[in-house]
Structure formats: structure tokens, C-alpha cells
Amino acid sequence: MTFPKKIAIDGTAASGKSTLAEKLATQLGYLYFDTGVMYRAVTFVALEANLDIDDEKVITELAERIQIDVQPPSVADGRTADVLVDGKDITWLIRSPRVERNVSQVSTYGGVRKAMTAQQRRIGLRGNVVMVGRDIGTVVLPEADLKIYLDATPDVRAQRRFDEKRLRGEDVTYDEILAGILLRDQIDSNRAIAPLKPAVDAHIIDSSGKGIEEVYEEALALIEDPIEE
């Protein structure tokens, strides 16, 4: 008997999957791996090199060329993991507003996604990892020992995102947040490459009406249920 060493958490936007994954990784002493940092890393390097973000061929070639690694945090400065490109620590550099404005474009490129999937698999197959994203259990790490798909109704997710942004002092309306959530759901679920959907063997958790602690306990129960070797 053994416990899962490779855990995949997928789900819709603002479903709480990143919060859940981080809590589980901390509890287990595993690497918390938000796969979105991979696309931020490619975007940062492209911008630093003054490459044309709209040139899919050039950005794809860059993604295929660089080596990205994600490791447990080496510095106690609030980071949840180290993000390295060709050995250089760029953990906080990928959080700049400039990267934020361009990462969505970069992440739509099929060649970039293919290159990042290969790198994500390399890291995930090491084990002792909680990976979070939108296609981990279906594409990136289908052999994960445990797969969780987290969801909630659009209105609940919109309210969560709205509350977060208002707490940060952002001037937003609930209606525009809801519209953004619905658009993201449509894009994620209908894209040609790695559409958002639960893996056939995923445990689906609906977080509507549940606090993070309740969701966490539900997920932890799945982890503590031993699996056969």
C-alpha cells in the first residue's frame, strides 16, 4: 500500500484549485507546481529578448529552446516555488505587469503548449508533487496517482473573484467579473488543444457553498485513502 506521490488538480477559473493545491502540498511536504508559471517564464524571456509576442513561430522556437525548472522554494520571501530558466532564478520577475499583459497570448500557441507539456511532465514525473492547471489529469500527467477536478457554479466563482479584487482595492463590478468567468469557461472548454474537462478517473469536488477548509478536508480524505501499488 502507498499514498499518491503525483497529484493532479484541475478545474475551472476561480474554483479555488490553486489554494487547495498549495494547502495540500504544504501538508504533504510536496512541491506545489502551478503550471501557469511555465507560460509566464516563456513570456518573460521573450519580452526580455524583445521578441514579437504575436509571432507564434518565434515564440514557439523559444519555448522549445529554453529549459524551465520548478523546485521547492529556496528563499523565505513569500514564494511558493522557485522558477528557473536555464538555471537563472526568475521567480518574481514573471509576476510583472508586462508579463501579465502578454501571457494569455503566449499560452494560446499550440507549439508552446506542446513544449511546456513536455517540461511539465519532466517535473511531474519526479513525484512528491501537487500539480495544478486545466489539463494536468487529461494531458500533462495522465498517470497521476490521484486526480481531482474542482468546480463551482459561475456565480459563486464570480463572487469569489469579485471579493478578492475589491479587497485589493480594484474598481470592478460583479457583472464584468461574471462575464469574464463565463468567457474563460467557454474558451477553456472549447479550445482545440487540451480542452478543459475532468479526466475519466478524476474525483470531482463541487466547491459551491463550501469553504476552503471543507474542500481541503474532502481532498485530504482522498489522499489518505491508500492505493494499491
Image (cartoon, rainbow, N blue to C red):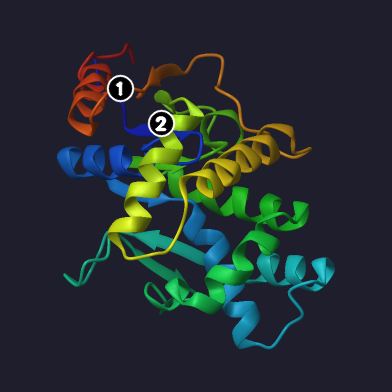
> Residue 209 has which mark?
1
Give amino acid for label 1: Gly
Q: Is residue 67 visible?
A: no
The reply to whether discs 2 and 1 touch (Cβ–Cβ < 8 Å) is yes
Between residues 201 and 185, which one lies in front from this camera angle?
185
Task: Tell me where residue 158 sits by quadrant.
Answer: top left
Between residues 106 and 86, which one lies in front from this camera angle?
106
Query: In percent of the image, x 57 and y 36: which residue is there?
Result: 135
Query: In percent of the image, x 23 and y 69: which residue is there?
Result: 74
Query: In percent of the image, x 74 and y 70: which residue is there?
Result: 59
> Residue 156 has which mark?
2
Query: In percent of the image, x 65 and y 42: which residue is there?
Result: 183
Q: Position of residue 33 (x, y in %)?
A: 39, 50
Give amino acid for label 2: Val
Q: Is residue 135 visible?
A: yes
Q: Position of residue 26 (x, y in %)?
A: 19, 45
Quadrant where the image shows the N terminus: top left
Q: Estimate the spatial distance between the alpha carbons at disc 2 and disc 1, rounded to whole Å.
A: 8 Å
Mark 1 residue element? loop
Density class for disc 2 (Cα within 10 Å; few <14, some 14-19, many ≥20) is some
Quadrant where the image shows the C terminus: top left
Density class for disc 1 (Cα within 10 Å; few <14, some 14-19, many ≥20) is few
Mark 2 residue element? helix
